[in-house]
Amino acid sequence: MKSLSEIDTTSKRASRAAGYSWGVAEEIGKNIRLLELFGLEGIKTLNQYYSVKDKEKFSNLNLIIENNISDKYPYCPIILGINFLDQIRTLEKFEKITFNKISFPLLLLPFLSRSSEIIGKKINLKFDKIKFLLNLNVNISSNLLDKNCPEIASNVEINIIENKDNFTEQEWKSLYKLSEETFVEETESLKQGAAGAGLTDND
């Protein structure tokens, strides 16, 4: 079994050989490592992308807005991902971001996952009845299990999820009330033994 370090290094070198700068290649190496770590087909998808990269045409999107439409070709997942990561502080203000078509969408996922960590918010990605939930770069959940990710994603929607509690205020109060049973009433002896309460200065 190949180590994550081997996956990272080989993906980076292959990406440089495919024509990307060392800086972009390094980002791709990190991403493929991340996909494989989460059990997704990073190496397979990158191979597929590089096998058609010079034969087919892809659109590069530099400035991402709320609704992004490519008239001719699907967006390149690498360039799109890098710019998404760079612009995430601006993009997090949008309620929804859409793209009409993206090639090899699996390669976009790690950029979104890393963006999720930067802003401290979950990101939801949906296309063609497929869903991904990116959770602060800690894990990726999806309904894609045991299925192949399509090479072209249509009607892509990205939602940045605002942080909120996953429980009601009443549920919190109930649990907090139970936790109060562990509180120890402060006594004079506890005060004397507390940190910083000593009478002797050892400096």
Image: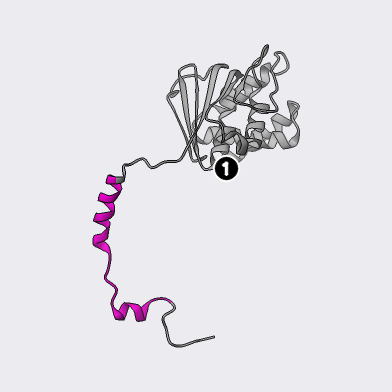
Residue 32 is inside the magenta segment: no
Q: x%, y% of residue 147?
A: 46, 19
Read off the residue under disc 1.
Answer: 118
Q: What secondary structure do most residues of the magenta stretch adopt?
A: helix
**Residue 7 visible in the current orientation:** no
Q: Residue at x 55, y 42 (%)?
A: 119
Q: x%, y% of residue 80?
A: 65, 27
Looking at the image, residue 52 lies above or below residue 1? above
Quadrant in the rendering for residue 190: bottom left
**Residue 144 visible in the current orientation:** yes
Q: Going by the image, does 41 lie left or right of 198?
A: right
**Of 139 and 11, which appears nearest the observer?**
139
**Of 96 and 189, which appears nearest the observer?**
96
Q: Going by the image, does 131 lie left or right of 64?
A: left
Q: Residue at x 49, y 31 (%)?
A: 39
Q: Residue at x 70, y 29 (%)?
A: 15
Quadrant housing the C terminus: bottom right
Looking at the image, residue 128 lies above or below residue 87? above
**Of 116 and 9, which appears nearest the observer?**
116
Quadrant in the rendering for residue 167: top left
Q: Residue at x 70, y 27 (%)?
A: 62
In this picture, which residue range is highlighted in magenta?
170-195
